[in-house]
Image: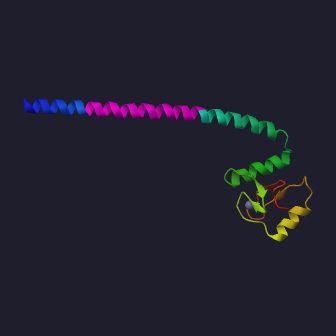
Amino acid sequence: MERRESAQERFEELTGRVASVQAKIDDATARRDAAFEEIDGEAATATKERGIVAGSVPDDLLKLYDKLRIKEGGVGAARLYQRRCEGCQLELNITELNEVRAAAPDSVVRCENCHRILVRTSESGL
Ligand SMILES: [Zn+2]
């Protein structure tokens, strides 16, 4: 009789644990699904925005960017910030900086180290 009661208690304890674990799984699944939905929405927005921007970029520059993006792990262009390429994080030497300074504002300049397209801004340190 005692063994039976003990087995019944153990069964109820384990049933409770299973229900608790299942509730955690259900909660995690719901959060995962919500995150997927949010990511899918962001990806759709980014894809749409990229299409708009890409339409304004000359074909040869877009081809270069796409080639570099594939080669460089998803980043084909990087900001030149305070004399540093934010793609490879290396600071340009004085010769490289002078070449960038001398380049026409609408010309494509690239990092000597990682070869990404350098995006010049007022904070480039030129
Ligand atoms: Zn670089």
In this picture, is 12 found above or below 68? above
Q: Position of residue 36 (x, y in %)?
A: 56, 34
At horizontal 43% and vertical 31% (from top left) the residue drawn is 26
Image quarter of the N terminus: top left
Image quarter of the C terminus: bottom right
In this picture, is 60 found above or below 35? below
In this picture, is 75 found above or below 33? below
Q: Quadrant of ligand 1?
A: bottom right
Q: Give the residues in magenta.
A: 14-37
Q: Is residue 41 magenta?
A: no
At horizontal 37% and vertical 32% (from top left) the residue drawn is 22
Q: Nearer the viewer, residue 24 or 68?
A: 24
Q: How is the image coloured?
A: rainbow
Q: Position of residue 17 (x, y in %)?
A: 30, 34
At horizontal 41% and vertical 34% (from top left) the residue drawn is 25
Give the left or right position of residue 1, taking residue 26 as reference: left
Q: Position of residue 90 (x, y in %)?
A: 72, 64
Q: How many marks?
A: 0
The kind of secondary structure the magenta stretch mainly shows is helix
Q: Position of residue 121 (x, y in %)?
A: 83, 53
